Image (cartoon, rainbow, N blue to C red):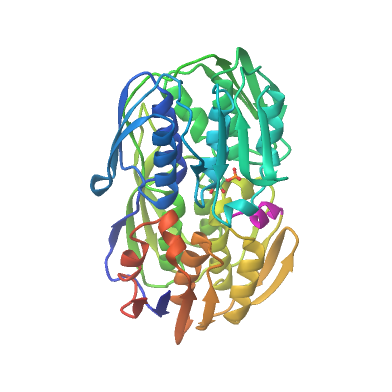
Amino acid sequence: MLKIKRGAPTHNTITVPGDKSISHRVLMLTALSDGACEITNLLCGEDCLHTVEALRGLGVSIELFPEHCSAVVHGCSGKLRAPKGDIHCGNSGTTMRLLAGILAAQPFCSRLVGDPSLSRRPMKRIIEPLSLMGAKLSAEGNNFPPLLVEGKPLQPITYQMPVASAQVKSAILLAGLFAQGKSTVIEYARSRDHTERMLQDFAVAIQRHGREISLKGPSVPQARNFCIPGDISSASFWTVAVAAQPGANLLIENVGLNPSRRAVLDILSRMGACIRETSIGQVEIGEPSGSLEITGTQLRATTIQGEEISNAIDEIPIIAVAGALAQGKTVIRNAQELRVKETDRITALTANLRAMGVGIIEHEDGMEIQGRDSLIGTHVKSFGDHRIAMAFSIAGLFATGETVIEDTSCIATSYPGFEKTLQRFSKGIVIC
Ligand code: S3P
């Protein structure tokens, strides 16, 4: 539980932990590579630790140094060992869906299980393409985990995706590493491209033409070291905390600025936020990154829809909080994917914002939020969802009285240390 009272930042420079999406992928690709790889600024949150344990259970040797946020992974050249029991993915959809792509090609059966939240998340979206490639997959709960994967020699496919999902795209590309020939994925809408970039960094022949991504298998990623930038999704909580607070200032150092992830910055800038990007690092290997300098102001409403949604999908909860503090009506549409995240985020955002006094209309694919000057402190739920818990922690900084967020242990899945940084924003933070 977190108890929060109004506040503004008292420290003007922070960093955020390593990017979650990139951390999962680099663990998996280094595990499949042909040698030893050192990973730095690895996110050691619970989700990524599930990926580490899953890979260890599949025979990969991983030396983990959580206090240094680093690891040395000894690649197994694509050949994993049959697990001794179930593979536990915890709350992590990325672990389950991406790993399924790799396991689809291994000569053994695996059973992937998740916590109650992950056990309600759709798996047909990966079962269908991986089955078309020749593996045998089924979900014990029809569309829902546990997920059974019987690995087979894979055929390449050309697959037109029916949803905008980087996890589905990545599962197919990872399976494609083991298929004989060219596999092609055609995206429904552009989603985060970390897998494509990283495969290229690991010397896999991969091509991108618009929404079509192709790779030629079989291919073993070449071992290399990898440094992960800070997570822009984590940075977005602090960005809103400052951007909506006239007079506040903050510098967030070393944030990943991959174009397929940075729509949150464009959206907030459209809302009037003053965000300056500085010292953008151009790297040969790895992802673009830089620092964000944010100055607070009165935000104004905007509309978020269409292609922008998949780029900003994880930031919608905190963008909705920004909308609640902006002048005018913020509209979010075409965001039905929010209903199948760690919780139904449309329902959760509607319930919590309404409880804080915000006028909100819920739609099947989004919401309309009437901004107001100040929020009303009250009890809200995390719904067991890390991003809902963090978004409403920030909302609490703008609320009268006290905001209590129940069940905040979920924050540890993606952002260890969040509460400590939050304490820099208000003297009135109690962690219970
Ligand atoms: C992720 C992709 C997104 C995102 C999730 C992480 C990834 O999910 O919401 O937090 O690392 O590939 P979808 O692929 O389901 O859109």
Nearer the observer, 382 or 403: 382
Nearer the observer, 193 or 379: 379
- Residue at the extreme front: 84
- At a point 70% along the width and 37% down the height, the residue shown is 188
Counting from the top left corner in percent of width and height, residue 304 is at 64, 56
The answer to whether 159 appears left or right of 107 in the picture is right
Nearer the observer, 68 or 205: 68
* Residue 283 against residue 319 in the figure, above or below: above
Give the image quadrant in which the ligand numbered 1 is located: top right
- Does residue 339 show up magenta in the picture? yes
Q: Inspect this view and state whether residue 84 appears.
A: yes
Segment tinted magenta in the rendering: 334-341
Q: How many marks are shown on the rendered structure?
A: 0
- Mainly helix, strand or loop, the magenta region? helix
The picture quadrant where one finds residue 290 is top left
- Does residue 319 show up magenta in the picture? no
The picture quadrant where one finds residue 338 is bottom right
Counting from the top left corner in percent of width and height, residue 195 is at 50, 32
Counting from the top left corner in percent of width and height, residue 214 is at 60, 21
- At a point 43% along the width and 74% down the height, the residue shown is 1
Quadrant assignment for the C terminus: bottom left
The picture quadrant where one finds residue 324 is bottom right
* Residue 419 against residue 222 in the figure, above or below: below
The answer to whether 373 appears left or right of 340 in the picture is left
- Residue at the extreme right: 364
- At a point 56% along the width and 46% down the height, the residue shown is 113
Q: Inspect this view and state whether residue 287 appears.
A: no
* Residue 328 against residue 77 in the figure, above or below: below
Counting from the top left corner in percent of width and height, residue 280 is at 36, 41
- Residue at the extreme bottom: 401
- At a point 40% along the width and 53% down the height, the residue shown is 276
